[in-house]
Image: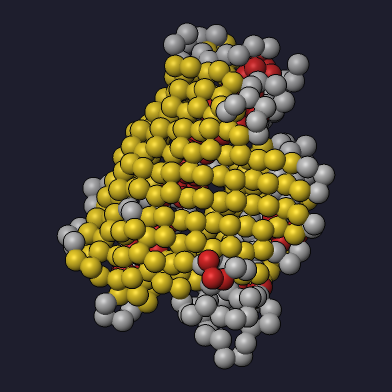
Amino acid sequence: MRRSVMWGLILAPLLFPRVLPAQGESWICATLFRASEDIMNLGDAAIDEAAFVLWGLAQLTGRVTTTGTAQQDAFNPDKWTYSPTPSDRLIIKYASGPTEEFVFTSADGYFQGDWSDLAASHRLEFHLKIAGRIDLQVNSTSIPSPPQSGAVDFNRQLKGGILFQNSWWTVDCTHSGRDSSYVDMDYTYKKVVEKVTGAAQTENVQFSFNDQRYTELIYYRNQFLQTRALTNNSSLNVGNLSYRYADVLVYWIASTQFADSAYAGHFNNAIELYNWKAEGTLFKNSSRYGTVIFDHPTPSNEQYGYCVFVKTINGDQYLVHPLLHWWLATGVATDAPVLPEQFSLMQNFPNPFNPETEIPYYLPRPAQVVLELFDLRGRKLKVLVNQLQGKGLHRLRFNAQGLPSGVYFYRLKAGEWTEVRKMILKK
């Protein structure tokens, strides 16, 4: 029976990497377009944390345990002791940092393998509380449907509050969908259909979510093909202003030049251009205010980067979503429009990994770069980069030798810009 367990804590600033300053309509249009991603991340992190705790306690006690107290040794972080009291909740005490408190109503699932298997197949209902930071009720099912089919139906209901940027956010949202896959010798297929509905608000900002996402990924003959669709009918109120997307649809198909580029999020080859769509309307204070468009007419050159913009009635254009990593494109015509450059932190590859992975990021201009690694508790483990770097694509090789298996976050700061992503180490 394994006696060494790594525990974690949801850290709100890592779940909501986008900041909420008064940056005008450019920020509003982009945030409203992508804000539901944060609700998905919040649900993922809450389920990962509950699965980590339950699976770790099962390893420690030899049974599924949902009450009592687990305490970390102050001199040996890998050593934990367990007490059966209290009998009505589960308390996780760290040698340093805040204490987690779980109240499980149900805790069923696949406890074989490791914690990620439980996160993928379960029925969990719990209340997670971290004093002054998180007070969240989670009801989650992730069930194969039908069994052995390669398809999983999931439904997550999140209700409660979370502290972010010194503001208390009240959340009442549902993230649901189906994740299906098929694997053969030289052919792999994965499709995810998901929807986010509900609301999140502070005293001054209110989101109302009604987003749907479709992703289909096919691997065949050493190449990945990705089809994606985003629909958005969400709204945002800031002070006396209200913004709402109506019938927004963005649809695109892309592929990779090399198989491994898909793992780092690089889909730099636009295909089936006649199928690409960017359409819909932006309303401001109930009046038609803008149109969702591509940043340029469909080009004849297939290797090209696209961006989605909102074009307002007064002629302004705001970037809301970069569909492809356009700086990796080749063969672009010299008279192609110049796209606005932006900072970007990409997904590490491979992910999951053991023990090495690569973290790519792009700088549109020279900047003082700080790249840091955090565990699930929010503890800073390492500073991977801290230096002035020039414009362009950078790739950092990271070796996790000495770290236990689990979920980690890496955060890139360049000037006032910040972005966070999640990585998984499996040994």
* 155 lies above or below 236: above
- Give coordinates of residue 242: x percent, y percent: 22, 59
In which quadrant will I find the C terminus? top right
Q: In this view, does 275 lie to the left or right of 187?
A: left
Q: Residue at 51% across / 44% down in the picture?
A: 193
Tell me, what colour scheme is on the image? secondary structure
Residue farthest toward the front in the current orientation of the protein: 274
Residue 18: quadrant of the picture: bottom left
Picture residue at 68% right of the left edge, 52% below the top: 218
Outermost residue on the right side: it is 185
Asked if residue 243 can be seen in this view, the reply is yes
Residue at 35 percent of width and 48 percent of height: 210
Task: Between residue 7 and residue 104, name the one nearer to us.
Answer: 104
Horizontal side of 374 relative to 157 (left or right) equals right
Which percent across, then down, holds residue 195? 43, 44
Residue 68, position in %: x, y?
52, 13
Counting the numbered discs, the total is: 0
Instruction: Give x and y (percent) for residue 401.
Output: 79, 44
Q: Is there any visible trace of residue 383 in the rendered image?
A: no
Quadrant of the image for the N terminus? Answer: top right
Of 66 and 72, the residue lying toward us: 66
Left or right: residue 56 versus residue 299 is right
The structure residue drawn at horizontal position 27% and vertical position 52%, both measured from the top left corner, is 205
